[in-house]
């Protein structure tokens, strides 16, 4: 069986046109991908900032809860305090190292933190601290005890508040 030459020529031309994309099609596809990528980038940045804020809130809550538990133990007489002390820990390391419990037959220690959490904004464990004697908005630590902590990062949160005010 023989194919007519004009049909054979048309089949050959048709096959050669189906081999790949034209330059115009590639440029259009690349432009669409760039538009989609540029739309996704701000969303990814916001999500990253949201995640950092969530970690910051969690770290602040963890340390503040440990400080409150230390204060409760001091108020209940479970921890020996110096005369005139308010019952707050002297530093954050005390929450990790632990303190001896009063009237404990086995000399047990009260440990309230496994480690000092890392500040996700500064990526360090160096927190700003306030003592009971400091002003509520003080940006320095008096050194007497640890009443509260805050991040030293000087940025603004997604809700418009300063991270150091959290």
Image: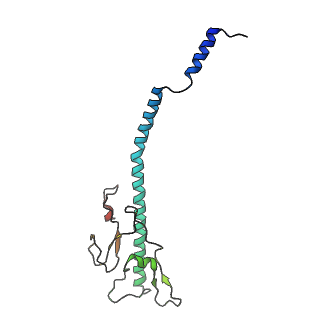
Q: Position of residue 160 (x, y in %)?
A: 31, 56
Q: Position of residue 61 (x, y in %)?
A: 41, 68
Q: Is residue 157 left or right of residue 36?
A: left
Q: Quadrant of residue 54?
A: bottom left
Which one is nearer the viewer's eye here, 11 or 53? 11
> Residue sitting at 39 percent across and 75 percent down?
92
- When the figure is inspected, residue 11 is found, relative to residue 144, above or below; the finding is above
Quadrant placement of the N terminus: top right
Q: Position of residue 126 (x, y in %)?
A: 37, 69
Q: Is residue 4 left or right of residue 13?
A: right
Which one is nearer the viewer's eye here, 8 or 112? 8
Tag count: 0
> Residue sitting at 41 percent across and 88 percent down?
80
Q: Is residue 68 left or right of residue 141?
A: right
Quadrant placement of the C terminus: bottom left
- When the figure is inspected, residue 44 is found, relative to residue 89, above or below; the finding is above
For this orientation, the residue located farthest to the right is: 1
Q: Position of residue 151 (x, y in %)?
A: 35, 66
What colour scheme was applied to this rendering of the protein?
rainbow
> Residue sitting at 58 percent across and 18 percent down?
14
> Residue sitting at 36 percent across and 80 percent down?
90
Q: Quadrant of residue 17?
A: top right
Which one is nearer the viewer's eye here, 140 or 70? 140
């Amino acid at each position: 069986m023989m194919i007519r030459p004009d049909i054979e020529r048309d089949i050959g031309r048709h096959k050669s046109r189906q081999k790949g994309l034209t330059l115009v099609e590639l440029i259009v596809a690349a432009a669409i991908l760039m538009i989609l990528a540029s739309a996704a980038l701000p969303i990814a940045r916001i999500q990253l900032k949201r995640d950092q804020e969530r970690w910051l809130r969690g770290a602040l809550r963890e340390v503040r809860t440990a400080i409150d538990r230390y204060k409760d133990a001091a108020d209940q007489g479970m921890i020996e305090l110096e005369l005139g002390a308010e019952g707050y820990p002297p530093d954050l390391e005390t929450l990790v190292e632990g303190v001896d419990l009063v009237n404990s037959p086995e000399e047990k220690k009260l440990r309230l933190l496994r480690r000092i959490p890392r500040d996700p904004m500064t990526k360090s464990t160096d927190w700003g601290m306030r003592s009971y004697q400091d002003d509520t908005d003080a940006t320095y630590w008096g050194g007497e005890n640890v009443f509260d902590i805050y991040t030293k990062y000087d940025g603004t949160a997604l809700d418009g508040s300063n991270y150091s005010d959290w």
